[in-house]
Image (tube, rainbow, N blue to C red):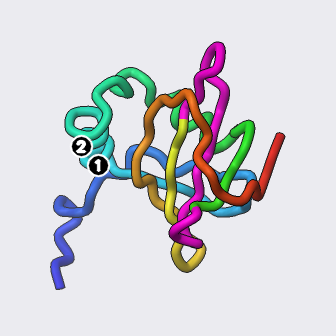
Amino acid sequence: MNNDLSSTPEILFDVTTPLGFSVRTTAEYWEFIVTIKHPVMLSRLVDVQKTLSEPDKIHLSKTDPQVYLFYREDGSKRWVCAIARQMNGDGFLITAYRTSAIKEGELVWQK
């Protein structure tokens, strides 16, 4: 087991959701999201944090009961979507992007 603290990933944020669990991500994983998956989100870190902590809607994934889709309005007919997985009471960010459509899935929370 490696006890070297310098190898511990740096937590970029840890945000509590309205569902009562926290979602976190590391600086390294955020860099992956904004450089590889969704570069349009590069300057949208605060928007993603607000989407998780103050969403307009939260849906449960149709395909995975541990995955939640958090939506927050972002202009006319646009949303920021932050997708997180909850396991054993902990949550972690899977990805985040802008969208014009809310995916199907059970609505589990609404503002």
Quadrant of the image occupied by residue 96: top left
Taking 75 as reference, is 42 above or below it?
below
Per the model, the C-alpha gap separating discs 1 and 2 is 5 Å
Q: Position of residue 90 (x, y in %)?
A: 54, 69
Q: Residue at x 52, y 75 (%)?
A: 87
Q: Which quadrant would the N terminus be assigned to in this image?
A: bottom left
Where disc 2 sits, the SS reads helix
Q: Position of residue 75 (x, y in %)?
A: 62, 15
Crowd around label 1: few <14 · some 14–19 · many ≥20 (10 Å): some
Q: Position of residue 9 (x, y in %)?
A: 27, 57
Can residue 72 be found in the magenta stretch?
yes
Q: Is residue 35 left or right of residue 71?
A: left
Q: In the rendered structure, which segment of residues is drawn in magenta?
A: 62-80
Taking 85 as reference, is 45 above or below it?
above
Q: Amino acid at mark 1?
A: Tyr
Mark 1 in CB contact with mark 2 (< 8 angstroms): yes
* Residue at the spot of label 2: 32
Can residue 9 be found in the magenta stretch?
no
